[in-house]
Amino acid sequence: MTGPASDAIVVDHLSKQYKKLRAVDDLSFTVRSGRVTGFLGPNGAGKTTTLRMLLGLVTPTSGNATIGGERYTELHDPIRHVGAVLEASSAHRGRSGRNHLRMICRAAGLPDSRADETLELVGLTPAGKRKFKGYSLGMKQRLGIAAAMLGNPQVLILDEPANGLDPEGIRWMRDLLKALAAEGRTVLVSSHLLGEMQVLADDVVIVAAGKLVRQGPVDEVLGSMGTTQVRVRTPQAAELTTALSALGATVAPQADGSLLVGGAEAAAIGHAAFTASVELHELVAERGDLEQVFLQLTAGMAGIR
Amino acid sequence: MNLINAELFKLRTTAIWWIMGIVLLPLYAASVLANWAQFASTSPDQVSDPDQAEQVRAALEPINVATTLYTSGQYFGILIVLLLSAIIVTSEFFHLTATATFLVTPKRESVILAKFGAAVIVGVLVWLLTTLLNLIVVPLIMNNLDLSSQLGEGAVWRAIGLNLLAFVLWAVLGVGLGVLIKNQLAATLILGIVYVVGTSAIGLIFFLLTQYVAQWFENLQVLIPTTASQLMISGTELPGNPPRWVGAVVLIGYAVVAGFFGTWLTKRRDIS
Ligand SMILES: Nc1ncnc2c1ncn2[C@@H]1O[C@H](COP(=O)(O)OP(=O)(O)OP(=O)(O)O)[C@@H](O)[C@H]1O
Ligand SMILES: [Mg+2]
């Protein structure tokens, strides 16, 4: 088993040209082991293309992508090392989910029993013998995750795995991915569910129009962009506004009667209210969330190309 | 070996193999009956052209009757093997399982090689099935035609062996063509139609070329794959035909070209 440091994913000046479209454009980032990394970007940003290049399914026009220092196609026993769930990946309509997994086991030289174990892991055992064409979207997604887990891999790469999962399923997947990362594995997961990513991811890589926009720990990315504002509720809005303006803070009255204050810490606002004898009903510091930051960062680059 | 096992498992776990089996059996029965009827009703005296009469006389020699009968079912058996071999490849794209397959085995030439292996095994199995049935049924027919079973003749066993070679080569050809025509519907339609109608259509073209352009075009007829495999197994030498190793060489040539080109193409292709 390889050490945690060697299981990093390194994308190095990767590009893919489709006819006139540069789907991925000189993209570089790294994904560390022991953490969940969110791979975010608007539709058509090149996420799927990047992941497919990483997995040796699509040939890059230029650049390199390695997992633990090796290209996927050079890995000795790839599915024991890397598990992947990709969109537009599927199973034969007429084959049962269990047989789909067994077929992978046979090709990889894994025992058939792994198929049943991973079916159990994703909660698909009752439907294991049913044909794939009868599966719901969420069941198909779970089968994909089961396939990825067959080789008990050290690295997991998932393209929108939450697609079609019910709330219980999303929570189950969050717990699973977090637990896997906590064991020191590398987890790279693309998603459009930014609320979910904010809870799940330790790091984010944000791309737009094929290029890297931002990469780093979620907290850092949020901190660098999220202009912290403070929401204040008071029956004496006019007095508080005067007092805060004197401090150089900006005050924006909201439709629900609260005030959004920028340029002042919650403590300073509380102090100003106290000295001005203004009664406060609510005083909450509001962090910009991932969705806000994402929209700011990708503004103007989000159009479908 | 794991990979060939996986390919056979893929085939086994879907409906395609028994559908093809159900299609094959009546077609096999029909070919046996047709062969029987033909030998029961033809005689060289009915033919006026002396050259043709010579051919018919040769074809009616007991040994040639035997080789034809003991390889009954070749025409449709090979058609089924051809289609199955192509489907072994095209279904990966049709059902979007190529992603899973190439994730397990990123070395694509290994996957294609395994598909060649699996297709060859399918070819051998279909050959085995038709040959076993022939060995049971044909002695009875020979008896009915007042001929001995001819099973002591080396030529019969050679024909059966060459029939096997034909099945194997067509299986390889099917995989190669499946890679080239990646669309499942297109592949089955094109291969099926070309196999069934193509022989006579291309034969007609060759006939016209021979008649109006140059006589030597006749010798190129063997380039039609179906003609080549017919020639390869056609018992002892019939007058007016090229030697049968030519048929074998032509078929092997096609199989090798389709195999290499198919592998090369699969390695280059983006899977998305
Ligand atoms: N095989 C292909 N041929 C031509 N263009 C392609 C191909 N695959 C992807 N593209 C284009 O490349 C761009 C990036 O596509 P990609 O699927 O990587 O985006 P994505 O970030 O995964 O988007 P989404 O969030 O919608 O899944 C798109 O504009 C797409 O149309
Ligand atoms: Mg995508």
Image (spheres, coloured by chain):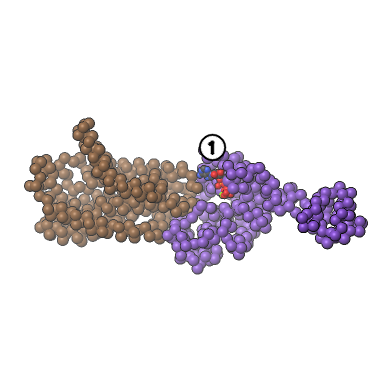
**Would residue A264 be found to the left or right of residue B160 on screen?**
right
Which subunit holds the residue at mark 1? A
Give chain A's shade: purple
Tell me the residue that label 1 is attached to: A20
Q: Position of residue A131 (x, y in %)?
A: 45, 62
Q: Position of residue A22 (x, y in %)?
A: 57, 39
Residue extending farthest top: B213
Q: Position of residue B167 (x, y in %)?
A: 29, 51
Q: Quadrant of the N terminus of chain B?
A: bottom left
**Would residue A276 be found to the left or right of residue A228 on screen?**
right
Label 1 packing within 10 angstroms: few (<14), some (14-19), many (20+) = few
**Residue drawn at (43%, 45%), measured in percent from left and top?**
B266
Residue extending farthest bottom: A126
Residue extending farthest left: B45
Hey, which quadrant is residue A17 in on the image?
A: top right
**Residue situated in front as seen by the camera: A226 or A96:** A226
**Residue situated in front as seen by the camera: B152 or B259:** B259
Q: Is residue A28 visible in this depiction of the protein?
A: no
**Residue drawn at (77%, 55%), measured in percent from left and top?**
A255
Hey, which quadrant is residue B131 in on the image?
A: bottom left
**Residue drawn at (69%, 52%), measured in percent from left and top?**
A290
**Residue situated in front as seen by the camera: A252 or B186:** A252
**Residue drawn at (44%, 58%), measured in percent from left and top?**
A93
- The answer to whether the beta carbon of the residue marked 1 is less than 8 Å from any atom of ligand 1 is no
Q: Position of residue A212 (x, y in %)?
A: 64, 43
Total numbered labels placed on residues in the image: 1
Q: SS of the residue at dot 1?
A: loop
Q: Is residue A16 visible in this depiction of the protein?
A: yes
Q: Identify which amino acid the numbered label 1 is placed on.
A: Lys
Give chain B's shade: brown
